Image: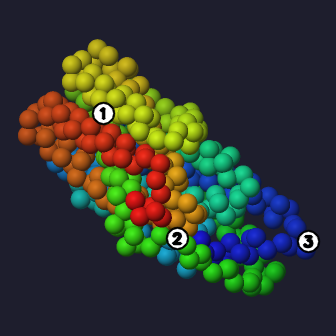
């Protein structure tokens, strides 16, 4: 992976380290955690107040479904630009710009008086999130090559905590502001603004060190053993991974966007529905540490994929039969099913033999997967509008989960894309 000028400068030893240079790793670690905390509230914070947003802005079910599909669209489209922007400006500067876009987009979104402006400002925030998604692993590897597992674990936990916090706290924050959903959502803009501070300090420190040490040596040439793009396009394993990634993302965004509404339509209070979404999202924090270790110890990850998929199917059945009566149980089952994400990421790392191959496979599987999952949440909203209930959407979600299990079993085979599989 090519190093930027900022990264090469930061790695070049200084003859007389200053306190600011010695504090740099701490600043980067704090920046990574704060960034991860802010990469999901823009999404998970909307679900608990979606009914109020729709009533206030006159938003129909189909448009609300489009809102739940926007994350996948933005992640697939804007994520492509992140590596090129990082090569030109440096990953720190790009993440800083992304956080600024998140803060600005969420702040203006809370003031939106129309559905169109709400969607546009949400897109701005999601564009910032997209570059953060792509560059977080890059920053962790470059600044903490010897502590990659620890740092990755920290920010993975922060992902889940950020999503769960937004789901749990948006309703209480709204209540504190005289039942204003605008104030409840505006809080997350302020949180994103706080995350800008450590990266600004890192960027300024890098500029000072560059002036003090001069230009660094050029990076070594990129390895030539990575699988070429045409080989990935022809690889059944690569496509199985992309399909599995896309279907698990589809399930996750459907649940994030629609589960609170399903619970509320069944008679669950808004506050409890928000807490249930927090449970769904929060389970990803502890299990994000455990499941990758389990996956790497299995020669075939199919049994793990099936286990998580069955949890999802059981949760959907519960929402069909007794959505309010066993709501907390269904929330736990759906939270377990949503933990397919760390399994998918782990399998991507296991299906290629070289670091360069993993990077290429990751870009292919994630970009294709996110683009695949765009129609799912939109169709759920449309089906709810057409039928006036949740049985048809749940049947559709069940079909998708069965397909997810099949794709995951295929992707979990002990094969590598370098073998032409």
Characterize the local packing of mark 1: few (<14), some (14-19) or many (20 or more) Cα atoms within 10 angstroms: many
Q: Is residue 6 visible?
A: yes
Answer with the quarter of the image where residue 91 lies. Answer: bottom right
Of 179 and 358, nearer the camera is 358
Q: Return the residue at label 1.
A: 259
Distance of label 1 from label 3 (alpha carbons): 55 Å
Q: Return the residue at label 2.
A: 226
Which numbered disc flags the more N-terminal residue, 2 or 1? 2
Number of labels in the image equals 3
Distance of label 2 from label 1 (alpha carbons): 41 Å
Q: Please, is residue 361 above or below residue 329 in the view?
A: below
**For residue 53, side relative to residue 242 (left or right):** left
**For residue 126, side relative to residue 95 (left or right):** left
Closest to the camera, between mark 2 and mark 1, is 2
Q: Please, is residue 225 above or below residue 159 in the view?
A: below
Discs 1, 3 touching: Cβ within 8 Å: no
Image coords of residue 195 (percent x, y): 59, 54
Image coords of residue 248 (percent x, y): 36, 44
Characterize the local packing of mark 3: few (<14), some (14-19) or many (20 or more) Cα atoms within 10 angstroms: few
Residue depicted at x 21% and y 24%: 320
**Mark 2: secondary structure:** loop
Of 35 and 375, nearer the camera is 375
Q: Return the residue at label 3.
A: 16
**For residue 228, side relative to residue 225 (left or right):** left
Image coords of residue 354 (percent x, y): 57, 63
Which numbered tag is attached to residue 178?
A: none
Distance of label 3 from label 2 (alpha carbons): 39 Å
**Mark 3: secondary structure:** loop
Image quadrant for the N terminus? bottom right
Image quadrant for the C terminus? bottom left
């Amino acid at each position: 992976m090519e190093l930027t000028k900022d990264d090469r400068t930061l790695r070049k030893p200084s003859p007389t380290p200053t306190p600011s240079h010695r504090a740099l790793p701490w600043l980067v670690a704090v920046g990574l955690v704060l960034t991860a905390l802010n990469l999901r509230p823009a999404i998970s914070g909307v679900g608990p107040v979606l009914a109020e947003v729709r009533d206030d802005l006159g938003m129909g079910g189909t448009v609300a479904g489009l809102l739940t599909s926007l994350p996948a669209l933005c992640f697939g489209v804007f994520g492509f630009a992140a590596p090129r922007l990082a090569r030109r400006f440096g990953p720190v500067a790009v993440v800083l710009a992304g956080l600024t876009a998140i803060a600005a987009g969420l702040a203006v979104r809370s003031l939106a008086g129309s559905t169109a402006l709400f969607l546009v400002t949400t897109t701005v925030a999601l564009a910032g999130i997209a570059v953060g998604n792509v560059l977080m692993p890059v920053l962790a590897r470059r600044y903490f090559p010897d502590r990659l597992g620890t740092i990755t674990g920290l920010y993975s936990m922060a992902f889940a905590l950020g999503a769960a916090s937004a789901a749990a706290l948006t309703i209480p924050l709204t209540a504190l502001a005289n039942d204003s959903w605008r104030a409840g959502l505006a809080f997350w803009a302020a949180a994103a603004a706080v995350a800008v501070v450590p990266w600004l300090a890192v960027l300024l420190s890098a500029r000072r060190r560059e002036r003090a040490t001069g230009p660094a040596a050029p990076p070594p040439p990129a390895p030539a053993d990575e699988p070429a793009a045409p080989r990935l396009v022809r690889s059944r394993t690569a496509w199985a991974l992309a399909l599995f990634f896309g279907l698990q993302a589809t399930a996750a965004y459907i649940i994030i966007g629609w589960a609170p509404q399903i619970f509320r339509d069944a008679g669950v209070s808004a506050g409890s529905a928000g807490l249930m979404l927090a449970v769904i999202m929060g389970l990803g924090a502890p299990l994000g540490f455990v499941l990758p270790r389990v996956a790497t110890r299995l020669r075939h990850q199919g049994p793990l994929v099936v286990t998580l998929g069955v949890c999802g199917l059981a949760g959907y059945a519960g929402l069909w039969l007794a959505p309010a009566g066993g709501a907390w149980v269904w929330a736990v089952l759906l939270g377990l099913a949503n933990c397919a994400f760390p399994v998918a990421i782990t399998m991507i790392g296991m299906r290629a033999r070289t670091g360069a191959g993993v990077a290429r496979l990751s870009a292919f599987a994630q970009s294709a997967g996110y683009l695949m999952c765009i129609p799912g949440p939109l169709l759920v909203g449309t089906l709810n509008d057409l039928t006036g209930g949740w049985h048809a959407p749940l049947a559709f979600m069940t079909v998708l989960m069965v397909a997810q299990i099949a794709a995951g079993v295929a992707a979990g085979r002990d094969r590598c894309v370098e073998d032409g599989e």
